[in-house]
């Protein structure tokens, strides 16, 4: 605080200087603050990084529900209003937002203050911005797909007979798991997969399946969580038998495919918790990324070594997916159905969304969503060893060790069956039926538990 000198300004208001330069107006800092917030897009909850209380005081005059003030350096408090919550660290703010489950916030900062100590303030702004963006992105995804997922769930529990679920196991698995994503660097790692497939358990994301099938690489398992058509498209292109790890929120058409053996885990939604009650089903919470879901699930299954392939978090040779992605290439570029004005508008908007990440050795072109998940992934410490191959594209800030084919062949024996704990449960609709009938915003539902095909959703509703 010694670098910030408090003075009484020319009109009698306190103000502050740093290195002989005023941070706030020497005349009317409160008026200056009011003019500043008039230029901001304010939501009911505002996070401020503004130092002295001038901006916070100006916000109190607005219809602001709550002000979250980041104060790593203590200035004189000018207001004790209960609407202002003061925090010294970014982690305290993160925990507070998690507790409130509120990420619909505005973030504003006082630029002259930030410039006085970029080490403290600028890094904090970046961290908060990425944190808020990631959670808003996930929340918007959850909101958009919420009804679709619930509708799929209800259709699936009425049409599926026996339901096999994945339950927790205590025994560790010695051989590594490989998560196969569909980044363009997958093309560089085909030899690695071909030579190590007998020593590693292969888990594929849906968008990699058509390419793997073409290369005659058949994963032990795949995971799908997207409730829309994309999952069906990728899986339907894969003609071999497929053990599919999924939730009951996937589109029912997927489970009508003849080559699919579905094994279910839970997203821990209200309806899932009811349906899977007392089953010890494995939970992998939704994070907006099937890759993260699979990684956390493999840790639950007891894998202590996990290798990442094709997880580029960006564009290699100008491509985000292996040879543009079969789904994107076949549909988005060849079908008139997707050639709408809305689609063209989205492409223009996304073109402005291009950004860059640093993998520890080079800059990688990416987009905002991938960058959010990249920073989130790097910020996590997973309870397992994570490896990259020697032909990876994204070095992940050199956080993880690189291995080659010889490392696998010299350190592991041929794999055995994983021995998953799979439990068959009865499809009992009673709890779900009672819950839906008692929902205030569900006015009409026709459920016949003796003839499950008669279950119909007659009104859109929200399960929150």
Image (tube, rainbow, N blue to C red):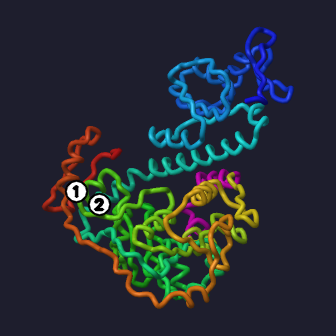
Q: Where is residue 16 shown, x and y percent of the image?
A: 77, 22
Local packing at callout 2 (Cα closer than 10 Å; few below 14, some 14-19, many 20+) is many
| Mark seen at residue 455 | 1
Magenta-colored stretch includes residue 403: no
Q: Position of residue 434 (x, y in %)?
A: 19, 48
Name the spot of residue 449 as percent of width and height, x first: 15, 58
Q: Residue at x 29, y 57 (%)?
A: 154
- Judged from the image, the secondary structure of the residue bearing numbered disc 1 is loop
The outermost residue toward the top is: 11
Q: Secondary structure at mark 2?
A: helix
Q: Are marks 1 and 2 in contact (CB under 8 Å)?
A: yes
* Residue 387 seen in this snapshot: yes
Residue 56: which disc? Answer: none
Q: Is residue 185 left or right of residue 408?
A: right
User: Residue visible at 33% across and 73% down?
Assistant: 256
Secondary structure mostly seen in the magenta stretch = helix
Q: Relative to 102, is 364 on the left or the right?
A: right
């Amino acid at each position: 605080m010694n670098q910030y000198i408090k003075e009484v300004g020319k009109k009698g208001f306190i103000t502050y200087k740093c290195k002989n330069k005023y941070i706030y107006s020497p005349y009317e800092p409160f008026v200056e603050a009011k003019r500043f917030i008039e230029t901001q897009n304010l939501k009911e909850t505002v996070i401020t990084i503004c130092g002295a209380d001038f901006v916070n005081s100006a916000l109190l005059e607005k219809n602001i529900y709550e002000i979250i003030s980041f104060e790593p350096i203590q200035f004189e408090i000018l207001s004790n209003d209960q609407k202002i919550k003061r925090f010294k660290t970014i982690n305290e703010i993160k925990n507070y937002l998690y507790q409130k489950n509120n990420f619909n916030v505005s973030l504003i900062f006082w630029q002259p203050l930030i410039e006085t100590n970029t080490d403290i303030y600028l890094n904090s702004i970046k961290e908060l911005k990425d944190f808020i963006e990631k959670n808003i992105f996930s929340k918007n995804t959850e909101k958009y797909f919420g009804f679709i997922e619930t509708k799929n769930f209800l259709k699936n529990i009425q049409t599926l007979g026996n339901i096999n679920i994945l339950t927790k196991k205590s025994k560790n698995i010695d051989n590594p798991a490989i998560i196969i994503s569909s980044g363009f660097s997958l093309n560089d790692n085909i030899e690695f997969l071909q030579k190590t497939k007998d020593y590693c358990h292969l888990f594929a994301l849906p968008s990699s399946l058509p390419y793997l099938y073409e290369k005659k690489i058949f994963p032990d398992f795949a995971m799908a969580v997207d409730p829309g058509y994309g999952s069906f498209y990728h899986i339907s292109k894969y003609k071999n038998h497929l053990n599919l790890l999924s939730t009951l929120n996937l589109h029912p058409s997927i489970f009508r495919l003849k080559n699919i053996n579905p094994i279910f885990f839970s997203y821990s939604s209200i309806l899932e918790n009811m349906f899977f009650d007392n089953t010890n089903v494995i939970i992998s919470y939704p994070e907006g990324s099937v890759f993260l879901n699979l990684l956390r699930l493999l840790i639950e299954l007891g894998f202590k070594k996990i290798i990442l392939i094709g997880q580029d978090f960006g564009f290699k040779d100008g491509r985000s997916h292996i040879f543009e992605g079969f789904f994107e290439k076949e549909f988005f570029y060849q079908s008139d159905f997707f050639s709408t004005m809305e689609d063209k508008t989205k492409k223009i908007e996304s073109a402005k969304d291009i950004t860059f990440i640093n993998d520890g050795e080079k800059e990688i072109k990416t987009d905002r969503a991938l960058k959010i998940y990249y920073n989130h992934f790097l910020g996590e410490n997973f309870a397992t060893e994570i490896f990259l191959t020697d032909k990876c594209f994204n070095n992940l800030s050199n956080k993880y060790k690189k291995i080659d084919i010889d490392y696998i062949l010299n350190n592991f024996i041929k794999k055995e069956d994983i021995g998953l704990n799979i439990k068959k449960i009865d499809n009992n609709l009673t709890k779900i039926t009672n819950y839906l009938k008692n929902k205030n915003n569900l006015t009409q539902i026709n459920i016949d538990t003796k003839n499950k095909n008669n279950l119909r959703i007659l009104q859109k509703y929200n399960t929150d």
